[in-house]
Amino acid sequence: MDEPTIELIETSFQALAPRGDELVAAFYDTLFAQHPAVRPMFSDDITAQRGALLGALVVTVNNLRKPDVLLPTLRELGARHAGYGVQAAHYDVVRDTLLSVMAELAGDLWSADLAAAWTSALDVVGATMLEGAAQG
Ligand code: HEM
């Protein structure tokens, strides 16, 4: 990820983070409404799951400039996801759902540049998690 992309991610996440609970709640509502097939992969009560996702997003954004910290963390997360039954195609679904929920929440602050920056960041996250899944 280049410097302008990292800056866009950091500043936009600072703006969104105070509404992080709302973000992840809307994320799972949208994910399960649009992709009901993935619902059974998760616990009935996803309260803890919302916090786990938000925490992982915070750790990711906070470590974009420290790949030596971020990449192994994401590989380990990805290896655990293989155990949850997560497949490569699911990462595209999660990326697109996150993008649409962030765009909705950000409102007028959203832009094509932000969409492109978050797409590339979430693609790196997904690819790195899949690397970890392949390594076991
Ligand atoms: C942006 C990429 C993703 C991030 C940052 C993320 C983050 C997390 C975190 C932090 C956990 C808590 C458990 C752990 O740390 O191992 C978790 C669990 C889980 N994630 Fe993800 N995840 C991502 C992508 C996905 C995708 C693509 C799926 C597939 C639909 C998925 C499905 C699950 C499931 C099924 C669980 C376990 C839920 C349970 O135990 O009830 N995740 N995820």
Image (cartoon, rainbow, N blue to C red):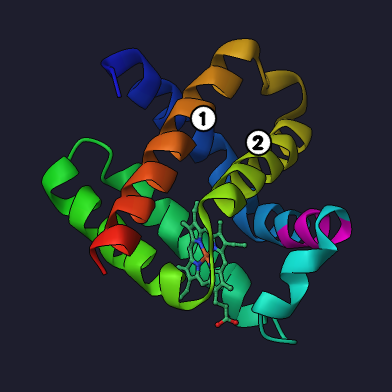
Residue type beneath disc 1: Trp
Q: Could you tell me residue 90's position as x and y percent?
A: 60, 53
Q: Quadrant of residue 29?
A: bottom right
Q: Residues within 10 Å of mark 1 (few under 14, many from 20)?
A: many
Classified by dominant secondary structure, the portion drawn in magenta counts as helix
Tag 2 and tag 1, C-beta contact below 8 Å: yes
Tell me: 24 left or right of 8.
Answer: right
- The residue shown at (16%, 52%) is 69
- The residue shown at (59%, 80%) is 48
Q: On screen, 48 above or below 79?
A: below
Q: On screen, 129 above or below 41?
A: above
The reply to whether residue 63 is in sight is yes
Mark 2, ligand 1, within 8 Å: the answer is no
Tell me: 111 left or right of 37.
Answer: left
Q: Quadrant of residue 100?
A: top right
- The residue shown at (11%, 47%) is 68
- The residue shown at (36%, 49%) is 60
Mark 1, ligand 1, within 8 Å: the answer is no
Nearest the eye: 120 or 109: 120
- The span shown in magenta is 28-33
Name the residue that disc number 1 marks: 118
Q: Could you tell me residue 86's position as x and y percent?
A: 53, 65
SS category of the residue bearing label 1: helix
Ranked by sequence position, the earlier of labels 2 and 1 is: 2
Figure disc tally: 2
